[in-house]
Image (cartoon, rainbow, N blue to C red):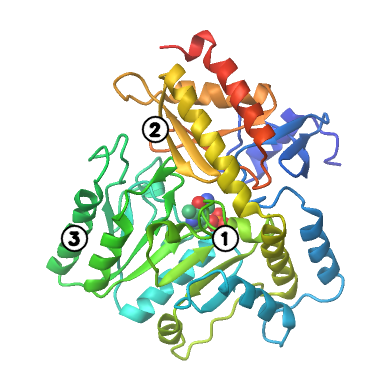
C-alpha cells in the first residue's frame, strides 16, 4: 500500500504519524532506494555521490558485510548468555586496534547506548556525578546523553545545562574564544575552572567527555596538547576520561585508527558506534580492567541485542574489510588530497573562511570578511550540490560548516568531482559577497 506513493504523500504521512521532531534532509527531500559504495540511488534511478555518510564506513551495502550478516542470520541470532565464537573473534579483533590498557569491551546497539553505559561506568568508578563536556558537543539521544550534550540543551527546545553538567568553550582556533595556534593551555584552563567550580559545591568530578575531532560542532580540530592537558587535570581531580569515537573512529582520521591516538592520550573509556556496523545497529564501549571491575559491582549488565552473533559477524567483517581494502590508508591519501585542494579553493574563494579536519573527516566554514557565519549560503550550497548529484550537509553552532565524511572508499576521482562542482557553484552570483 505504501509503495509508489508520491513523495508529498509520504511527507504528509510522516508529518502526521511519525515522530513530530524527526527532520528531513534538503529543501526538496530525497527518496533513496538503494546504496552502493560511495553512491546513493533515488526512486528515479539517479545516483548521488555521498560525501556525508560516515555510517556506511566501508561503502553502502558492502557485499562482504551484507553476506556476513545474511549468513549468520540464517543460522542463529540470540543474546550473549550462550557461548558463541563470533563475540570472541570480534572482541579480539576490535581490542587489537587499541593500546593494551584498553582491554575490555561491552557490546551495545547505538552510540547513545555506548555513551549511556560509559556514564554509568564512570559513576560506578568515581561515585560522582559531575561531568565536564564541550560547548556544542553531542553524545546521544538518551536522558543522560542529552544532559551532557550542549548541542541539544543549549539549542532550540533545550533548557540549558543541568546542575551536574559543566560546559567548557569549544576550542575552535578559527572563531572560538581564543583563536590561532597554541591555544591548548588557554582552553584547558576552563577545565581547571570547572573542576574548581565542582569542588566549590562540595562535590567531586566524575569525568570528562570529548570527541577527538568535534563533529556536530562543525568538524573542529582540537588544539595540539588540549586533550593531554584536559586528561591530566581531570585525572588529578579523580575523574575519568571518555573519548567519544562514534564519528571519528575506525581509521577515518587516516593517520591513526582512533582519533584519540592523534593526541597521544589513552582514555579510560572509548565509545564506538556508527561505522563499526556499516549501517547495522552496533556499538561498543571499550575500557580498562579497573573501570570494568568497578562497574561489575554485582548488578548484572544485560543487553538483549548487544553482542549477538549477527552483529558480531557484521562488525568483524567491517574490521576485515577496512584492513583488506586498506581503507585507513585511503582515508589518509584521499583526505590529504582533498584538504589541500580545498585550501587552494579557499585562496580563490574567500567565502571559505576555514578548512579543517583529518583524513576523510573534513569540513569547511563559510564566513564573510569579518568571520561572520554565512548560514544561508551554506544551506544554499548543500542544496545546490544536491541538484548536481552530490550529497553534502551543514553543521556547527551557526550551521555554516559543510561536513565531508564520506564512505571510506571515496576515491581521488570522487574528490575531483566534489571539487569541480564546488568550484562551479562558488562562482555563482549568490555565493559572492
Ligand atoms: N556521539 C556522537 C559524537 C554522535 O555523533 C552521535 C550520533 N550523531 C552519537 C554519539 C549517538 O549515536 P546514535 O545516534 O547511534 O545513538
Residue 168 shown left or right of residue 264 in the figure: left
Does residue 122 lie above or below 338 as drawn?
below
Corner quadrant of residue 201: bottom left
Q: Which residue is mark 2?
A: 398
Q: Which residue is mark 1?
A: 273
Pick whichever, 223 or 295, lies toward us. Answer: 223
Q: Earlier in the sequence, mark 3 or mark 2?
A: 3
Task: Give x and y (percent) for residue 4.
Answer: 85, 34
Q: Residues within 10 Å of mark 1 (few under 14, many from 20)?
A: many
Q: Which residue is mark 3?
A: 192
Q: CA distance from mark 1 to mark 2?
A: 26 Å
Under circle 2, the secondary element is: loop
State the residue at coordinates (58%, 39%): 23
Corner quadrant of residue 27: top right
Of labels 1 and 2, the one closer to you = 1
Task: Give x and y (percent) for residue 164.
Answer: 28, 63
- Queried on whether the Cβ of the residue with tag 1 lies below 8 angstroms from ligand 1, the answer reads yes
- The residue at the far bottom in this view is 298
Task: Give x and y (percent) for residue 409.
Answer: 68, 46
Q: Residues within 10 Å of mark 2 (few under 14, many from 20)?
A: some
Pick whichever, 71 or 353, lies toward us. Answer: 353
Amino acid at each position: 500500500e505504501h509503495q509508489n506513493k508520491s513523495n508529498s504523500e509520504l511527507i504528509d504521512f510522516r508529518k502526521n504519524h511519525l515522530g513530530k521532531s524527526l527532520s528531513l534532509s534538503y529543501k526538496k527531500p530525497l527518496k533513496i532506494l538503494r546504496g552502493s559504495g560511495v553512491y546513493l540511488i533515488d526512486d528515479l534511478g539517479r545516483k548521488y555521490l555521498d560525501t556525508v555518510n560516515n555510517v556506511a564506513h566501508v561503502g553502502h551495502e558492502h557485499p562482504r558485510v551484507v553476506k556476513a550478516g545474511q549468513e549468520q542470520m540464517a543460522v542463529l541470532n540470540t543474546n550473549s548468555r550462550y557461548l558463541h565464537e563470533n563475540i570472541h573473534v570480534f572482541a579480539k579483533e576490535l581490542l587489537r586496534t587499541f593500546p593494551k590498557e584498553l582491554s575490555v569491551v561491552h557490546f551495545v546497539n547505538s552510540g547513545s547506548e555506548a555513551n549511556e553505559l560509559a556514564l554509568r561506568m564512570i559513576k560506578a568508578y568515581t561515585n560522582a556525578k559531575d561531568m565536564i563536556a564541550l560547548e556544542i558537543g553531542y553524545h546521544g539521544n538518551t536522558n543522560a546523553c542529552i544532559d551532557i550534550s550542549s548541542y541539544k540543551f543549549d539549542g532550540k527546545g533545550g533548557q540549558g545545562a543541568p546542575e551536574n553538567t559543566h560546559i567548557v568553550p569549544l576550542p575552535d582556533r578559527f572563531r572560538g574564544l581564543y583563536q590561532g595556534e597554541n591555544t591548548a593551555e588557554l582552553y584547558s584552563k576552563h577545565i581547571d575552572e570547572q573542576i574548581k567550580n565542582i569542588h566549590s559545591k562540595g562535590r567531586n568530578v566524575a569525568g570528562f567527555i570529548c570527541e577527538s575531532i568535534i563533529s556536530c560542532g562543525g568538524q573542529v580540530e582540537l588544539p595540539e596538547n588540549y586533550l593531554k592537558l584536559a586528561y591530566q587535570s581531570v585525572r588529578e581531580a579523580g575523574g575519568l576520561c571518555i573519548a567519544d569515537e562514534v564519528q571519528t573512529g575506525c581509521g577515518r582520521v587516516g593517520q591513526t585508527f582512533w582519533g584519540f591516538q592523534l593526541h597521544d592520550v589513552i582514555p579510560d573509556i572509548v565509545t564506538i558506534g556508527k561505522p563499526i556496523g556499516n549501517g547495522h545497529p552496533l556499538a561498543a564501549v571499550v575500557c580498562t580492567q579497573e573501570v570494568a571491575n568497578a562497574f561489575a559491582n554485582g548488578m548484572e549488565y544485560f543487553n538483549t541485542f548487544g553482542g549477538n552473533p549477527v552483529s558480531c559477524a557484521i562488525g568483524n567483517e567491517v574490521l576485515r574489510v577496512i584492513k583488506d581494502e586498506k581503507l585507513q590508508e585511503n582515508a589518509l591519501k584521499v583526505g590529504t588530497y582533498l584538504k589541500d585542494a580545498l585550501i587552494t579553493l579557499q585562496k580563490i574563494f574567500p567565502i571559505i573562511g576555514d578548512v579543517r579536519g583529518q583524513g576523510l573527516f573534513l569540513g569547511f566554514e563559510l564566513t564573510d570578511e569579518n568571520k561572520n557565519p554565512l548560514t544561508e549560503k551554506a544551506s544554499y550550497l548543500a542544496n545546490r550540490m544536491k541538484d548536481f548529484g552530490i550529497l553534502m550537509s551543514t553543521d556547527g553552532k551557526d550551521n555554516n560548516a559543510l561536513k565531508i565524511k564520506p564512505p571510506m572508499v571515496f576515491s581521488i576521482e570522487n574528490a575531483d568531482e566534489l571539487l569541480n562542482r564546488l568550484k562551479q557553484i562558488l562562482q555563482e552570483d549568490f555565493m559572492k559577497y
